[in-house]
Image: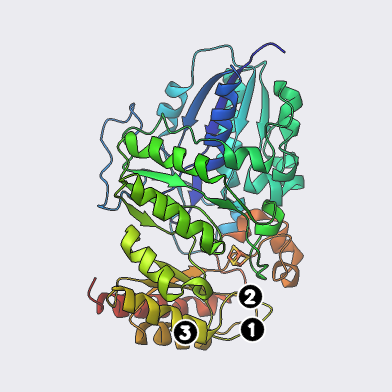
Amino acid sequence: MTKKNVLLINPWIYDFAAYDLWMKPWGLLKISSILKNDGHKVFLLDAMDRHHPLLDMPASDHEDGTGKFISVEVEKPIQLSRIPRKYKRYGLPVGIFIKALPDADIDIVLVSSVMTYWYPGVAEAIKIAREKYKNAMIVLGGVYATLCEKHAIEHSGADLVIGNSSLDRLSSLLGQRGAFGYGSILAEKIDYGLYEGTAYGVLRLSLGCPYDCGYCAQRSLGPGFMVKDMDKALIEIKYLYASGKKIFAFYDDALLFDTVYFKEYFRRIADEGIIARFYTPNGLHARYIAPDVADDLKRAGFADPIISLETIKDNALWHEKVTRSEFIKAVENLRKAGYAQGEYSAYLLLGVPGGSLSDVREAVEFVHSLGARISLSEYSPLPGTALGKAVDPKIISEPLLHNNSVFPTFDMSDWDKVNELKSLARSLNSSLKK
Ligand code: SF4
């Protein structure tokens, strides 16, 4: 089949808050490599690239490579009008985005999507691409496309919406058989050529997770648990390291689940002489932080390991991945491995249906008492999850209301109490030396 000109777009974020916590369009960057390997001409435009060469002001980075996105306040959609916060578009100014579109005869535009409630950015990118590339086929994939397929078909403006489990449909469009299955995408080396100015690299050693927490959509998004071929995993980190990246964020949902693989990977990295700092934005399972694993985390250079605790109520509907006692044990092991108090964190979940603010307060105090920093994540009700089923269908059918800043399950009368909890967490965190 003739080779195509393909434009890959990572669109804007529309939200009340956004910060570049090692955020890169991992799936799109894998697809970029696959397409290039097959001889297609690939262009990539990442609206969330803080170091885009067309930006006048170089982005400033925090020492861990993270940083603020450029943003501009935009009008709130009617569904969000009651929220007393500024609503913004994060990412490249629209004028720069348009200027950065390649002057080429594009055959196919592939647009990625992440949070369901960021879909206004998806629709805007598609509208702009449609105006410039009148004959191109526009295809939408990613999380929003997978979890809200019907909504995306009706509202995104794409010609074709492809959920994660149907990514193979790209094969017929591009004349590649079987190149876009989960296994192929995981195995492929990431295309990071666009990000010379970015201090960090992103990695995944596995896809999926063996658990099925009530608030998590990973079962709808992935294949179940699978690991990357070890040699390919090493080739990928060596490529990123050779390009100057010394900070890495793992996107794995269950990084420690295959402990044998994890230990072997870091042993071989050490043999290669790779000295880097590693972050785990998706959180770690306490259950697998055994003494030897905690030692490996410390030795390998994991900074601020985050344990996913979510709640201290051992409530099976939420999750079965961690108990209070497993969390205590994991913290003990981290401490013995050399992490001081304030050098590790715990995720707690706020706003889950059936959970109370007093439970969250208790969890905040418990986590602090063990010397962990508190990272409060707000619940987002997602289609296809056990807890999402209990949420008003009107909320589920409007992705804007999945926004975790909106607290759809809280009364507005809880707003002040939620803010109090957040400031309690901040002040407890600042009392811990880091
Ligand atoms: S352990 Fe994490 S990734 Fe796995 S199902 Fe639960 S929340 Fe999702």
SS for callout 2: loop
Residue type for callout 2: His
- Of the image marks 2 and 3, the number of the one nearer the N terminus: 2
Q: Classify mark 1: residues with Cα within 10 Å, few (<14), some (14-19) or many (20+).
A: few
Amino acid marked by disc 1: Asn
Q: In this view, does 48 lie to the left or right of 143?
A: left
Q: Distance between the residues labelled 2 and 3?
A: 15 Å
Label 1 and label 3: CA atoms lie apart by 13 Å
Q: Are the residues flagged by discs 2 and 3 in contact, CB closer than 8 Å?
A: no
Q: Which of 330 and 112 is in front in this view?
A: 330
Which residue is label 2 attached to? 319
Quick check: 203 above or below 320? above
Residue 274: x and y in percent read 32, 46
Residue ID for mark 1: 315
Decide if residue 330 is in sight here: yes
Quarter, ligand 1: bottom right
